[in-house]
Image (cartoon, helix red, strand yellow):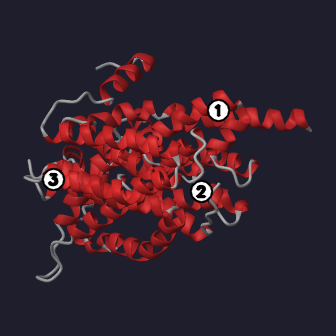
């Protein structure tokens, strides 16, 4: 196993950026309409038990990542098969993130540029980061995060003059069902996607703080998503927000203070680029780690490049249109259940039974 | 669109020279063959994508499977 160590701070920042990564621009679910803030809060509470499961898995097997844990719990053959499922999940998620970004760039600013070019160039940067290792990604995140979140959140007070409180009323007018459905969407995308970090957080310096990192990363990320979603609803209103593909970008676009603070939507685009870069890099790193474990390859960095190129291929062919991409979000919340809930819970239960029997 | 083909070729070539060749020199055969197969496959796919071939997306069968398992409509 390669020796890499990341600090608690780097781990937390990485998780915050991972959580807000693509959801900052895409949004997750529009079913809850003006009650989106309730849906996000419910989703955060829903994700707490899963965060506990993920961190418990890691602390039960100190220094080992999910792929090692699966082999230890399920045995060599079954462990490798389940590991393969997680390799696919990380790989697929990374490709989806790259595609989300290329769609965003094409729709917003470069309609004539082929998406292949956008995917290749962002993919190459992610490939470089994943090849350099999680330590480098962690250090880079710790460097960029303090600037990034400030730039992102400063747009909220600046858009105060455009906000209309009436847009968020009436509360729970459309019954509880759409709110719960929306909450489940937010749970699977992005909060429980942090399951990917079970393949990474064996590198945390202080293993005892795994749950703290998981909790603080998800809560801070969730709070930022909450603030931005409420900002979008207050500025644009429910109908425009639900009709738009990229509401955050449009909400900030309306911002104009005097003659000098204008065109601030670039802040959203910049932070989105950072988020996508981190998320896709972590996914690629996780997929490479898994393949290396399955094939008994000592250094996962040696196989990052071909997996990265395949990820770019998948990103190019995964959707045929922007509409299909947004339609996929409805399927994704069910598709992710085995990876985010079923397998981790079963693994933890079997691991605990094995410990109990052994002692 | 055709300009992408030389760009892709150069990128792949650089990776072959600087990332794959050392595996051959160091006689890491498992990594070398894994790398060679995957990079050749992705190069072919890239070219097909650039030439506007309609390649099947895994999203469609996944969507069908998920709809079948969870009884979703549409």
Dot 2: within a 10 Å radius of its alpha carbon, few (fewer than 14), some, or many (20 or more) residues? many
The label number, if any, that marks residue A48 in the structure image:
none
Identify the secondary structure beneath mark 2.
helix
Who comes first in sequence, dot 2 or dot 1?
1
Q: Residue at x 34, y 37 (%)?
A: A329
Dot 1: within a 10 Å radius of its alpha carbon, few (fewer than 14), some, or many (20 or more) residues? many
Asked if residue A265 shows in the view, the reply is yes
| Whether residue B72 is situated above or below residue A257 in the rendered picture | above
Identify the secondary structure beneath mark 3.
helix
Q: Are marks 3 and 1 in contact (CB under 8 Å)?
A: no
Is label 3 or label 1 in front?
3
For the C terminus of chain B, the quadrant is top left
| Image position, residue A287 (x, y; %) | 49, 45
Front-most of residues A146 and A286? A286
How much space separates mark 2 and mark 1, taking CA atoms? 24 Å
Q: Quadrant of residue A352?
A: top right
| Whether residue A148 is situated above or below residue A327 in the rendered picture | below
Q: Is residue A255 left or right of residue A273?
A: left
Q: Quadrant of residue A269?
A: bottom left
Of all chains, the one bearing label 3 is: B
| Image position, residue B25 (x, y; %) | 47, 55
Q: Residue at x 10, y 52 (%)?
A: B3
Q: Is residue A347 left or right of residue A184?
A: right
Dot 3: within a 10 Å radius of its alpha carbon, few (fewer than 14), some, or many (20 or more) residues? few
How much space separates mark 3 and mark 2, taking CA atoms? 44 Å
Is label 2 or label 1 in front?
1
Of all chains, the one bearing label 1 is: A
Q: Residue at x 58, y 29 (%)?
A: A81
Of all chains, the one bearing label 2 is: A
Q: Which residue is mark 3?
A: B6
Q: Which residue is mark 2?
A: A214
How much space separates mark 3 and mark 1, taking CA atoms? 42 Å
């Amino acid at each position: 196993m390669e020796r890499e160590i990341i600090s608690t701070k780097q781990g937390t920042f990485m998780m915050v950026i991972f959580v807000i990564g693509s959801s900052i621009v895409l949004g997750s679910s529009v079913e809850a309409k003006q009650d989106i803030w309730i849906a996000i809060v419910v989703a955060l509470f829903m994700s707490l038990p899963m965060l506990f499961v993920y961190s418990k898995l890691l602390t039960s097997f100190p220094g080992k990542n999910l792929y090692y844990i699966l082999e230890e719990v399920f045995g060599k053959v079954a462990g490798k098969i389940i590991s393969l499922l997680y390799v696919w999940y990380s790989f697929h998620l990374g490709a989806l993130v790259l595609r989300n970004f290329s769609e965003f760039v094409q729709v917003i600013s470069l309609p004539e540029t082929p998406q292949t070019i956008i995917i290749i160039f962002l993919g190459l940067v992610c490939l470089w980061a994943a090849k350099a290792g999680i330590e480098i990604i962690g250090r880079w995140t710790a460097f960029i995060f303090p600037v990034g979140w400030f730039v992102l959140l400063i747009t909220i007070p600046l858009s105060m003059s455009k906000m209309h409180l009436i847009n968020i009323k009436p509360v729970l007018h459309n019954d509880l069902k759409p709110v719960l459905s929306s909450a489940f969407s937010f749970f699977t995308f992005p909060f429980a996607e942090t399951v990917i970090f079970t393949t990474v957080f064996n590198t945390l310096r202080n293993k005892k703080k795994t749950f703290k990192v998981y909790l603080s990363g998800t809560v801070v990320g969730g709070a930022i998503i909450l603030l931005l979603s409420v900002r979008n609803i207050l500025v644009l209103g429910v109908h425009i927000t639900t009709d738009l593909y990229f509401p955050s970008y449009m909400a900030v676009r309306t911002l104009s203070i005097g003659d000098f603070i204008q065109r601030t939507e670039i802040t959203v685009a910049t932070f989105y680029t950072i988020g996508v870069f981190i998320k896709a890099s972590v996914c690629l790193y996780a997929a490479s780690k898994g393949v290396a474990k399955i094939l008994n390859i000592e250094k996962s960095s040696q196989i990052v490049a071909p997996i990265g190129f395949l990820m770019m291929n998948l990103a190019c062919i995964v959707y045929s249109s922007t509409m299909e991409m947004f339609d996929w979000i409805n399927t994704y919340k069910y598709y992710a259940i085995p990876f985010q809930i079923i397998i981790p819970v079963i693994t933890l239960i079997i691991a605990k039974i094995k410990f109990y029997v052994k002692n | 669109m055709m300009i992408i083909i030389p760009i892709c070729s150069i990128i792949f070539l650089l990776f072959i020279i600087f990332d794959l060749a050392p595996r051959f020199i160091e006689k890491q055969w498992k990594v070398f063959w894994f790398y060679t197969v995957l990079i050749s496959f992705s190069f072919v796919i890239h070219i097909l994508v650039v030439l506007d071939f309609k390649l099947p997306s895994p999203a469609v069968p996944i969507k069908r499977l998920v709809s079948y398992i969870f009884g979703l409509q549409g």
